[in-house]
Image (cartoon, coloured by chain):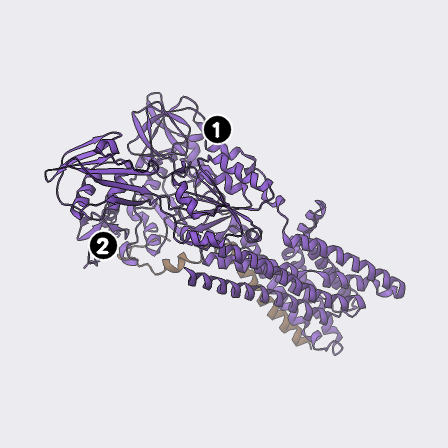
Amino acid sequence: MGIIVILILISLSIAILFLAIFYWSMKSGQYDDTYTPSVRMLFEDKKKEAKDK
Amino acid sequence: MVEVEVGSELKCYHCGQTCEEPLWLNDKPFCCYGCKTVFEILDSNDLCEYYTLDRNPGNTVGATNKEAFAYLDEKNIRKKVIDFDSPTFASVKFYVPAIHCISCIWLLENLHKLNPAILKSQVNFARKLVDVEFDPGQVQLSTVAATLSEVGYTPQINLDADQGAKPQVNKQLILKLAIAGFCFGNVMLFSFPEYLGLDHSDHNLMRIFSWLNFSLSIPVFFYSGFGYVRSAWRSFKDKQINIDVPIAAGLIALFLRSSYDIITATGPGYLDSFTGLVFFLLIGRWFQGKTYESLAFDRDFTSYFPLAINRFVKNEWKPVVIYDLNRGDQIRVRNMEIIPADSTLLDAFAYIDYSFVTGEAKPVKVLQGELVYAGGRLIGTPVNLVVEKKTSQSHLTSLWNNDAFKKISESKYQKIIDSAARRFTWVVLAIAVVTFIYWKVYDPSQMWLVLTAVLMVACPCALALAAPFTFGSMLRVFGRNNLYLKNADIIEKLASVDTVVFDKTGTVTHGRTPEIKFEGHLTPLQLGHIKLLTSYSTHPLSVLIAKSIKVTSTETAEDFKEFSGKGIQGIIHGQRYKIGSASFTGSITQANPLGTHVFVSIDNEVYGYFNIKSSVRPNFKTMLERLSDKNTSLLSGDNDSDRGSMQKLFNTASSLLFNQSPHDKLRYIEQLQREGKKVLMIGDGLNDAGALKQSDVGIAITDDTGVFTPACDGILLGEKLHMLDQYLELARASSVILKTGFAISFFYNAIALSFAVTGYLTPLVAAILMPISSISVVGFSSVAVNFIAKRKLKNIKNLS
């Protein structure tokens, strides 16, 4: 029966890890603008100018 | 190869507007010098990819002026605008309403190619913001703004705008929601053995599950759900019971009871119900919190006025913030700028467009020494003025000193949900007390358990969800149909409206594009000649007439003369054209003295006159007919030259008031409200701002959501005004849906209470009943709203 406890703890800690990642991404503003980046990635730099980013 | 539309309709390569007299460059047509200049700038900087991403992406460019942003370099203005400042690096956020397509993003993110001192620029499309990082050692802030303006993206600068406040709240809500959802899901998993009745198979495992549940619900109670407890406490202190009071009571009862059960090992607790409840409640809040980020509902006059103006001090012109203007200051106002304070004119004459103040679209001629009111827009050459009154005390801005702008709108309106919650709370308390006493008498060992059970199921989760989902769905339906409301509460107010007040210019009529008809007969050739002559003149009426004539003439006029206040004349093809007032052209026909007429004579023979009047929006009359169960009135800042045509539109019971000042409009609304009416005000200009604010619901009409609208509760696209009655009906329908939702929620509560009172509320029953009631209310509200909206709006499409 001990094995189920270990499994639960592992799965729970992985889930909490993902929650923490979501929390961090939300806080750092990754969802502030959901449209512009999708367009930005399609732009091409014609002369291979290193875009400062 | 360049694609050019064949035929007479040439579209500007830059902005896509029809070119009347195209300017050609590299085989590409342009409608004006502004567009052509932008193309030249982009072409010389190798930025023409701009035109390949989207067709005709540009914005029509008005006259730009580097000086116009000079005030940004003033130390205290700069400090307010700029986000981060150091000698070599500075960043600033500009609000650019003109952002509308992919090309815009591309160009604005390549600003560093236009000006190397701009290090980086980043666009936030949804909020129409450009974040510019630049080197202040090499380029001034004013130049950065001017660079944007040159390519057609004039930034709107507002010192008071605290951008970023709104999304912050939303962000926190989503975080709370995420945590509640996470914990809810896991608690449900750990409660599964319970649901399946396996609780006696392994006691130790059950204890572990209980403790895991308990630790997972701690963040739900203290982080996600704590807002309800806090809000309930606050409203309790104010002795105003709102919906949060019974919710908080339920949440606390659930959490404490479950904690007690788990700690004392007497039971598994109700934590699955508890976390689920918080999760559903937060979803409701999130759903209701739909906002239109790119629209602003809280603007006051400061957004219309320039931030700074050039003042003549010690023999030089220096920019000064308009609030620092004092009586006697000499200022200079340029073409299309707003007069910042009531002042007198120093130059010989000026044309002032008072459309903000009066709603009247026709510019007014002001002579030397006459008073010019703040809020007027100068049309034509720059003029010098002497300030008479400070900005805050001027004719128009004193409107904002009215009480209507100070009171908090929340207090005056009793929300349906809160009045329902009040009654609900008392009933629940009464039931709780009665059951408590009953159990105390018959079985004291059970009395606390039953009491908490009653409080737990009484938690009006479904009740609290009905409103957000009904109004939230309706808000989205309205948004899809171009009525943008500030928040969902407005729908409730809209439903109770019984009086509708319209502004005239810009609302009932198209403000900016008047209808111009020629009364008489002219050949197309003659019309072409008239266009030619009028296009020489800068008089506003000439401009309007020139614009309205589609025929162009290639001939040249000789002996062109303009007689101020009378008209213009010129000789084309040996024929003498006179265009102007009746006496100037020698007309003896006495046209209707009301309205604006421009007469035309050729070789001293009068051919007729141009009748210039503003046109009523299409389908407006049929909409008014459908609104006949409400009181309607019309307020206009204009003279009553349109009374006849307005009388035909409105029914006889409506009052039509003309020559109304902004203050008069506000007072009229106040008077209606004193008679107990619920007033919906529909207006568009700054002159309606007071009335919009005072009314129960104020909706601003605009033909372009990028354009400024005064402070209001909602923004409606002009072309959808004929659907107003449908919107009102939908708002009323949503009240009915809401009340039905309440009934469903009460039904479930009654069932749950019957379990609780009799002492049979097991965790399993709670875990089934609570989500079912929430989901059925949510499902009913959303489906009903969309169904009714679809049916009503289909009807209107058939009608029009």
> Residue B575: image x %, image y %?
12, 38
> Residue B601: image x %, image y %?
19, 37
| Rendered-image quadrant of the N terminus of chain B | bottom left
Residue at the image position 42 percent from the left and 51 percent from the top:
B620
The purple-coloured chain is labelled B
Outermost residue toward the front?
A: B589
Tag 2: amino acid: Glu
Vertical side of B324 occupied by B512: above or below: below
Q: Which mark is residue B393?
A: 1
Determine if marks 2 and 1 fall on one subunit.
yes
Vertical side of B620 occupied by B452: above or below: below
Chain A image colour: brown
In this rendering, which labeled residue sits more in front, label 2 or label 1? 2
Q: Say which element carries label 2.
A: loop
Q: Which residue is mark 2?
A: B9
- Near-viewer residue (B139 or B24): B24
Residue B518 in sight from this viewpoint? yes
- Near-viewer residue (B413 or B94): B413
Q: Chain of mark 2?
A: B
Outermost residue toward the right?
A: B441
Tag 1: amino acid: Gln
